[in-house]
Image (spheres, grey):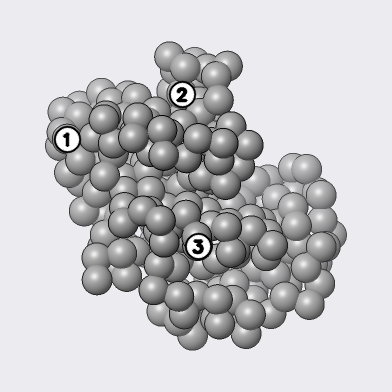
């Protein structure tokens, strides 16, 4: 089995203290690649440094919607410049979060639009976070028809899934899909096209069953993948092969 954790935060507490052991535990379970995600500009250097230390780790460059107010001057230019690094394979995570509203919604939209413009200029895919902001998210994705990427840690409606897929975007499932109360998400997981599905941990958050309550690690992507494979009535090996191929097709710079 060869899996990719398409979204983790290796620089966050709970993982950063023992980075090598965390990665080795994941590798022992068949995880062959890790996309290390940034959420604020001051993290970019650390996120890239982890990718420089490990051949199977890549980096993203972006600002989470919670941080939009703290980055009022962030435009596409800074993102484009940082994305020139050979280990940076994605823009994000970025997007809209109206559930917590930790940043002004107008600022969130402006930062999101800057990320989409940076993706257009660089040709890199975008890692999108969206919560309780489905219509505005889709509107912004439609405003950038030449940009693609992934709706990460997907927990949205079937409508959002269908809209995203129609625009050519991929969908990534995290440990949330294993939760007992995630029935609607489990139904959506069954119908995502084979070539548009990714799996992730979002570690150190959202540990899947049977690890709920623990610090999530990239190794646990194997548990999420096995659960999704059972939902889709395929073998874990088949799902691993499909999602890994999808990762390298979407994040093509990782295959270079």
Q: Find the distance from the CA under tag 2 to the CA under tag 3.
A: 27 Å
Which residue is at a point 58% across and 64% down the rendered structure image? 45
- Sequence-wise first label, 2 or 3: 3
The N terminus - image quarter: top left
Label drawn at residue 208: 2
Residue 232 can be seen, yes or no: no
Mark 1 surroundings within 10 Å by alpha-carbon count, few (fewer than 14), some (14 through 19), many (20 or more): some
Q: Secondary structure at mark 3?
A: helix
- Sequence-wise first label, 1 or 2: 1
- Number of marks in the rendered image: 3
Where 127 falls versus 175 (above or below)?
below
Q: Find the distance from the CA under tag 1 to the CA under tag 2.
A: 19 Å
Label drawn at residue 38: none
Residue closest to the eye, 117 or 133: 117
Q: Where does residue 239 sit, x and y in percent of width and height? A: 21, 37
Q: Which quadrant holds residue 249?
A: bottom left
Q: Where does residue 213 sit, x and y in percent of width and height? A: 58, 16
For mark 3, what is the residue?
A: 48
The C terminus - image quarter: bottom left
Q: Secondary structure at mark 1?
A: loop
Label drawn at residue 1: 1
- Sequence-wise first label, 3 or 1: 1
Of badges 3 and 1, nearer the viewer stands: 3
Q: Find the distance from the CA under tag 3 to the CA under tag 1.
A: 27 Å
Q: Where does residue 10 sit, x and y in percent of width and height? A: 51, 44
Q: Is residue 189 left or right of residue 237?
A: right
Q: Secondary structure at mark 2?
A: loop
Q: Which quadrant holds residue 62?
A: bottom right
Residue 34 can be seen, yes or no: yes
Q: Is residue 249 left or right of residue 10?
A: left
């Amino acid at each position: 089995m060869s899996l990719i954790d398409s979204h983790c935060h290796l620089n966050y507490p709970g993982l950063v203290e023992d980075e090598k052991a965390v990665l080795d535990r994941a590798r022992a379970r068949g995880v062959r690649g890790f996309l290390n995600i940034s959420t604020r500009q001051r993290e970019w250097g650390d996120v890239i440094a982890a990718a420089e230390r490990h051949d199977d780790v890549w980096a993203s460059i972006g600002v989470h919607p919670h941080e939009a107010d703290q980055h009022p001057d962030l435009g596409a230019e800074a993102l484009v410049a940082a994305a020139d690094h050979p280990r940076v394979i994605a823009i994000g995570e970025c997007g809209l979060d109206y559930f917590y509203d930790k940043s002004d919604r107008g600022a969130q939209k402006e930062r999101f639009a800057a990320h989409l413009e940076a993706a257009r200029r660089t040709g890199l895919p975008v890692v999108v976070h969206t919560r309780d902001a489905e219509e505005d998210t889709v509107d912004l994705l439609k405003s950038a028809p030449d940009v693609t990427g992934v709706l990460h840690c997907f927990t949205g409606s079937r409508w959002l899934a269908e809209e995203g897929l129609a625009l050519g975007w991929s969908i990534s499932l995290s440990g949330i899909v294993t939760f007992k109360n995630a029935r609607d998400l489990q139904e959506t997981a069954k119908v995502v096209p084979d070539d548009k599905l990714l799996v992730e941990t979002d570690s150190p958050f959202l540990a899947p069953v049977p690890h709920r309550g623990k610090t999530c690690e990239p190794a646990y992507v194997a548990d999420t993948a096995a659960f999704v494979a059972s939902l889709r009535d395929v073998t874990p090996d088949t799902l691993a092969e499909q999602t890994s191929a999808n990762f390298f097709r979407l994040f093509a710079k990782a295959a270079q």
